[in-house]
């Protein structure tokens, strides 16, 4: 009888030890940095971008993606010892692609909104923006409050999924809103008189005025909002977030970010490369 009890106790102990060993092995196999592991295994950092938001990101006539954000992405890739691959897609598809693991991070003039931060992490800001109007109507240039254009007779256009779309829906709800997949389409709608104004970040509005000097375009200044632009990061990799945050602080402290801002905002030679 005693022997039988001893055998049962030994069997239970063996089972528990096996279970503990299995748990330990499983825990060892769970990486503390799954996205970094993925990047290093591929030897490639995949960065999502709309590639149509000058001067932060844009596509040349030859199909090359350039701008402040591609340059910043290259710094990040170099710091990890991997190559950079820019993945262009419509702005509204960027965060779903990040959440699905199709890209490793997003640098695409993305405002660090709380509602976005509920699903993804953010590092930054590396640039401060704000909402403005691009229009051909001189009457809109004196607007100081969104309520002044909050009318069913006003037609506005905004980038799909952008804070411009949210701005109109929340602050100018009575106006008719049209959304587009990229800013080129939206700017053309303003030029052709199909809408009264484009609601977008002020760099887009200002640069459109310089890009099309013969189209009688106007940009509303100063911006109507304060919007910090940051890097959207995966929610499940704090080590990657920490790495990029530290790198951004180093670039800011060393003057590299100021150099990038000066290159893309004060020198307009890149305008000749656009379609």
Image (cartoon, grey):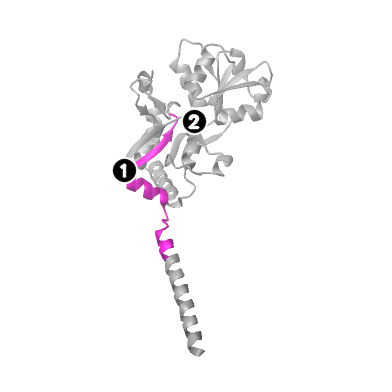
Residue 228 falls inside the magenta stretch:
no
The residue under label 2 is 91
How many circles with numbers are drawn on the protein?
Answer: 2
Name the residue nearer the viewer: 152 or 101.
101
Quadrant for the C terminus, please: top left
| Region of the chain picked out in magenta, as a range | 24-50
Q: Position of residue 41 (x, y in %)?
A: 33, 48
Image position of 195 with respect to 44: above or below: above
Image position of 71 with respect to 148: above or below: below
Name the residue nearer the viewer: 15 or 237.
15
The residue under label 1 is 82
Q: Residues within 10 Å of mark 1 (few under 14, many from 20)?
A: some
Query: Is the Cβ of the residue at disc 2 closer than 8 Å to that at disc 1?
Result: no
Q: Position of residue 191 (x, y in %)?
A: 51, 13
| Residue 173 appears in the figure | yes
Residue appearing at x 44%, y 42% in the figure: 101
Q: Which mark is first along the chain, 1 or 2?
A: 1
Name the residue nearer the viewer: 3 or 121.
3
């Amino acid at each position: 009888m005693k022997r039988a009890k001893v055998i049962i106790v030994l069997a239970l102990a063996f089972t528990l030890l096996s279970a503990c060993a299995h748990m330990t092995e499983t825990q060892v196999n769970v990486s503390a940095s799954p996205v970094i592991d993925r990047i290093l295994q591929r030897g490639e950092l995949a960065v999502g971008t709309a590639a149509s938001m000058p001067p932060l990101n844009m596509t040349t006539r030859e199909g090359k993606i350039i701008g402040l954000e591609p340059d910043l992405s290259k710094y990040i890739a170099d710091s990890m010892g991997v190559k950079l691959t820019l993945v262009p897609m419509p702005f509204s598809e960027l965060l779903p692609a990040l959440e699905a693991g199709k890209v490793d991070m997003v640098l695409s003039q993305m405002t660090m909104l709380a509602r976005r931060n509920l699903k993804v992490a953010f590092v930054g800001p590396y640039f401060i923006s704000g909402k403005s109007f691009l229009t051909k109507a001189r009457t809109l240039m004196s607007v100081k409050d969104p309520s002044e254009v909050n009318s069913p007779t006003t037609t506005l256009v905004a980038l799909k999924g952008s804070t411009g779309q949210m701005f109109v829906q929340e602050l100018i709800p009575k106006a008719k809103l049209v959304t587009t997949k990229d800013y080129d389409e939206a700017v053309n709608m303003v030029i052709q008189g199909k809408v009264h104004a484009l609601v977008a970040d002020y760099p887009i509005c200002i640069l459109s005025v310089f890009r099309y000097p013969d189209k009688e375009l106007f940009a509303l200044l100063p911006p109507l909002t304060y919007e910090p632009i940051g890097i959207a990061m995966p929610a499940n990799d704090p080590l990657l977030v920490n790495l990029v945050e530290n790198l951004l602080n180093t670039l800011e402290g060393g003057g590299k970010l100021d150099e990038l801002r000066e290159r893309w905002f004060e020198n307009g030679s890149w305008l000749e490369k656009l379609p």
